[in-house]
Image (tube, coloured by chain):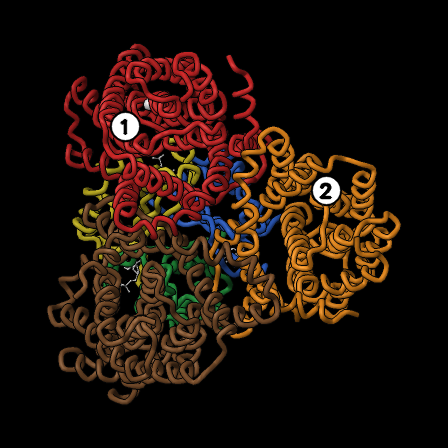
Chain colours: A yellow, B green, C blue, D brown, E red, F orange
Amino acid sequence: MKRLDLIVAEPELERLCGTLRQAGAPGYTVMRHVTGLGHGGTVSEGMDFSGFGANAHVVVFCEAAQLEAIATAVRPLLNHFGGVGFVADAEPL
Amino acid sequence: MKRLDLIVAEPELERLCGTLRQAGAPGYTVMRHVTGLGHGGTVSEGMDFSGFGANAHVVVFCEAAQLEAIATAVRPLLNHFGGVGFVADAEPL
Amino acid sequence: MKRLDLIVAEPELERLCGTLRQAGAPGYTVMRHVTGLGHGGTVSEGMDFSGFGANAHVVVFCEAAQLEAIATAVRPLLNHFGGVGFVADAEPL
Amino acid sequence: MDSSLVLQNLLSPPVLFFGLGLLSVVLRSDLEIPAPLPKLFSLYLLLAIGLKGGMELQHSGLDRLVVLTITAALAMALLVPITSFLLLRTRFDTYNAAALAAAYGSISAVTFITAETFLGALAVPFDGFMVAALALMESPAIIIGLLLVRLTTPRDSGPGLGWGGLLHEAFLNSSVLVLVGSLLIGVLSAAFSPAGMAKMEPFTEQLFYGALSFFLLDMGIVAGQRLRELRETGAFLIAFALLAPLVHAAVGLAVAVVLRLPQGDALLFMVLCASASYIAVPAAMRMTVPQANPSLYITASLGLTFPFNIVVGIPLYMAALQRFIPAT
Amino acid sequence: MDSSLVLQNLLSPPVLFFGLGLLSVVLRSDLEIPAPLPKLFSLYLLLAIGLKGGMELQHSGLDRLVVLTITAALAMALLVPITSFLLLRTRFDTYNAAALAAAYGSISAVTFITAETFLGALAVPFDGFMVAALALMESPAIIIGLLLVRLTTPRDSGPGLGWGGLLHEAFLNSSVLVLVGSLLIGVLSAAFSPAGMAKMEPFTEQLFYGALSFFLLDMGIVAGQRLRELRETGAFLIAFALLAPLVHAAVGLAVAVVLRLPQGDALLFMVLCASASYIAVPAAMRMTVPQANPSLYITASLGLTFPFNIVVGIPLYMAALQRFIPAT
Amino acid sequence: MDSSLVLQNLLSPPVLFFGLGLLSVVLRSDLEIPAPLPKLFSLYLLLAIGLKGGMELQHSGLDRLVVLTITAALAMALLVPITSFLLLRTRFDTYNAAALAAAYGSISAVTFITAETFLGALAVPFDGFMVAALALMESPAIIIGLLLVRLTTPRDSGPGLGWGGLLHEAFLNSSVLVLVGSLLIGVLSAAFSPAGMAKMEPFTEQLFYGALSFFLLDMGIVAGQRLRELRETGAFLIAFALLAPLVHAAVGLAVAVVLRLPQGDALLFMVLCASASYIAVPAAMRMTVPQANPSLYITASLGLTFPFNIVVGIPLYMAALQRFIPAT
Ligand SMILES: Nc1ncnc2c1ncn2[C@@H]1O[C@H](COP(=O)(O)O)[C@@H](O)[C@H]1O
Ligand SMILES: Nc1ncnc2c1ncn2[C@@H]1O[C@H](COP(=O)(O)O)[C@@H](O)[C@H]1O
Ligand SMILES: Nc1ncnc2c1ncn2[C@@H]1O[C@H](COP(=O)(O)O)[C@@H](O)[C@H]1O
Ligand code: NA
Ligand code: NA
Ligand code: NA
């Protein structure tokens, strides 16, 4: 199996989850209110009151065979809006 | 070493942590207020006020030798109450 | 690439992030309000009101070549203040 | 029926904010009251009605009417889940029928509070001991629910809760504890620290209406999200969720007439019978009957019965009881 | 200029708490108002001014002045972003110029609220319909901003928002929804449930000043953090962020004189023109014009224009308008 | 001893809610006040007492008594940690002795606030400058604590805080900053913006009692969880945590008698001496003396000394001082 870690800005979260569902992800887990540093600079929770928000961290565990479809669907979002994605190996418990 | 990712409903968290301690896990880290999608459908924070809660994400780093004991203790909980678990490789820093 | 998971007490977070930036980490993601069990005993959110805080979970994705510099910078902090670090393999999406 | 009561309820700020919450879901706005703010409001509301009820209970004392009303409340908390189970069992498996029955046998504190506010706007008085009835009707249905499962299915040997865990869950869950605790604190403080109670008053009285409106805005959002899942619910359960409150309110009215409850207490009694739990019971059922599908019992109680009672039920019950119980 | 107005504003609790927030950033203290508490205060403030404005609107009704003022407000919401764009385009690319123009064409509700509070301290009255003007001036600049991008750049074929998504984002974002919803609830409740409105009063009136102070403490922290990023902003944008409010306020004053607005309404109108959005617009621009750099438009509106208006602008505009508009 | 004072304190709403929190831990209920709500209440309480103290300080001005009291407060903030260290060093290593000494040399704002509320219920007046004493007694013990470590151990060459970091941590941590900042805002606003201060009053005065009760409910839960860890604490530290407040209060009483403080100020002075910090000091010690075991100093100050003072100490100190200081 594969583990996919995606980190995007919170306002894009709903769209990312929709994309994951359409691309056939069997499930996902979302941590909101996540902060960090990336190419776009520092992201803090200071703008939380504004709808601008912080980041969200989405984890997807899926079969290796599903990964390519998910990656193809997700990459344009990361390119357009920013955000990063990483893949690792995993096994079901 | 091994890395174990467990995602369960928040009301089951305390029991899961107790099980981990009894099974000899050397430590764990818990992220609450986590949402997601799984076989049980969508989990949101909307019911947070009610004691029904969202999900919790528990990460355990342990020796490969400890994994089987932990897995044996945890699996019945996941089967009874729902929730998922995944294993990956890791090394101490 | 490598994935580095660091878990420290919240009051040390700002210093850890500064250390990561100085050590050349290309980015990081921070989850605060994390609880857990370790050598230092149980950490809960009960002291959150006090500035004592809970834990923070920091994830860094970096090139394998960068890891050693980051590890060298981070280890003294973990030894002095407590906290744990683990490394795993990862690939960019 | 007195349609002006319905209109007056519909156009009060708390109900309008509930509607704004529903509307925001329909319009797919990104409005949310982020966690744990709804918890702040729900803790506050429980604490405030507990304190006020306790204070009034201390002033009025325990008389025959109090004891009778509370006994009747407990009887309803046994009757409703059992009869509901028998009906629901015709369409659902034991687990889902029991979980639904438990939800409808228990109560919704927010519906009760909205009814109190409705009475306040009509200047109809009600008694503090009704908060005790509210507290006592919360837990029994949880026990009944699990009893029904245990009696009608082979003993489940999973890692579930034992009876100890269940009783703990039923009687010591946080909403029961805050409500009962505040009630007792109200009784004690009113007796021994009247100056202290007086200083609580701006907090528990003056903020109450605004906090209820804010919380109902969130409840509107949450109920609206549940309504979206209505497709999975099925016509039978939709009908049950809208008719059960009427039937249970009617039984409640009959009891109130027999007990000669005054108008205000009678409305609150009817509302307790008519409302369903979406707080304590679902949390307990998730742990004790994990075989049941939460989206059934939460959608029914929170997505249908709750809005029905808030928007239409409360003024309807008032109009009905005015025919049988004279104003005092 | 009447320097006592500046001093009186500067030494009022809300502005002093704003200063404390700024100071805590300068001193690198660990003071923070953790999320989602600032959201609680911002929701509360919107809800409270919406309700109060709606209630007053219901009492005053819609007359010619209301219609004229609101038309003028909409005209300013179109004029300001277009002229700002033309100016900003000389130094920034289309994306950044459009995003900045949209921010300055829209409004800051907290600046408006602080101006209301300032008028309250001076005992200068103002009308409820100004809240309607506030609500109506929030969204148009978002549309203008994207129109400017679409008209001046080749059609972008990324996964961005279509026009439907944009209109949704502009008119149904949570701050517009809460403000407009509360305004309508205020109108309806004042008409049909005056007892309900009266019970809201301790919540919406008495807490208001304290909640504003608390929120401004957080805004001071957030603005202070933005000020640290000033280096990246450039001298031109710094000058724009400090001069645009003055120019827009002056235009607003001219309009107010023509419309014969009374002093209170005139100040609020000037403040609407002079303030820039750091809530609805940045959130919309992040999604619709991701090519623009958020640290430019947020730092300018939140780090510079907002503090300028809160600390200096409001009393300055008041001093200016007193020369042209007699007290009533 | 006047046992009615103890009873009156015990049956006041804030102390009863503290008891409810303790009880919920004993009963293993799932009641929690989720983060960051406790932070909201603690920020609010600091802000409110700061403002009130500042306002009163502005009205009373600085006279000889103020200066003497504040000097005595600072002296106690040096004396208590040094003597405590000498005693604790007999049983603990330098690190733990110093961390514990620092905790007991500093103060607990919530204990102070509860004492103010207790005085309010007895209608015993007290002065605004005592809040300044509170603010000034928070930090020195942090410095003393680290000085004791540095003087008695070889220089630690880890990545710890230097003196700059320590002073920063001691004097600019968020609770000191909010308290001192609000105090100064209170002084300034009372002088220059009395209308503004008047509009703050419903927020800072009327909500205060309820907010304190809510916060003490949470403190009861947190203290209860700490009490569970008592086994690791050891009999010596348990005795210290319960006797130190009595001894320090007695010294405080002697000082108060010498200074001829009126009853109210004397109680507050005793409470400052008797209370131990579980906010600023532990946070600073975690960073500056990581070798010390937090569960020792937090359990002692939060699990034992705090409940002791809240429940028994405050009325006890009052009963004691009434023998030496006449009512005014
Ligand atoms: N494939 C998956 N990847 C990531 N998280 C998952 C996955 N499946 C389930 N989860 C998480 O586990 C929770 C419970 O899963 P389930 O019991 O399958 O409903 C979900 O709400 C998700 O948060
Ligand atoms: N084996 C482990 N697996 C996962 N998290 C751990 C582990 N050990 C420690 N932690 C986390 O790291 C924090 C600090 O660890 P320690 O310094 O060992 O007390 C703990 O509170 C946990 O959140
Ligand atoms: N190398 C990295 N390791 C961990 N998280 C990262 C990394 N790069 C970016 N992120 C996260 O992804 C967010 C968006 O990244 P970016 O689009 O590069 O600004 C950042 O705010 C971080 O939270
Ligand atoms: Na019921
Ligand atoms: Na503007
Ligand atoms: Na002390």
Q: Chain of mark 1?
A: E
Determine whether the beta carbon of the residue marked 1 sits less than 8 angstroms from the nearest atom of ligand 5.
Answer: yes
- F327 over E105 or under it: above or below: below
Q: Amino acid at mark 2?
A: Phe
- Residue at coordinates 42% horizontally, 48% vertically from top-left? E203
Q: Number of marks in the image? A: 2
**Position of residue D18 in the picture relative to residue F68 (left or right):** left
Work out whether residue D110 can be spotted. no
Q: Residue C19 placed where, x, y %?
A: 54, 37
> If the image is split into quadrants, where does the N terminus of chain F sit?
bottom right
Q: Residues within 10 Å of mark 2 (few under 14, many from 20)?
A: many
Q: Residue at x 55, y 34 (%)?
A: F195
Of residues E267 and A91, the one drawn nearer to the viewer in this rendering: E267
The percent coordinates of residue F110 (x first, y second) are 63, 54
Residue under the point 53% across and 72% down: D187
Q: For mark 1, what is the residue?
A: E137
Give the residue at mark 2.
F129
E271 relative to D186 in the view: left or right: left
**Could you tell me how far apart the alpha carbons at marks 1 and 2 are, in whole angstroms?**
47 Å
Q: Is residue D128 above or below residue D205?
A: below
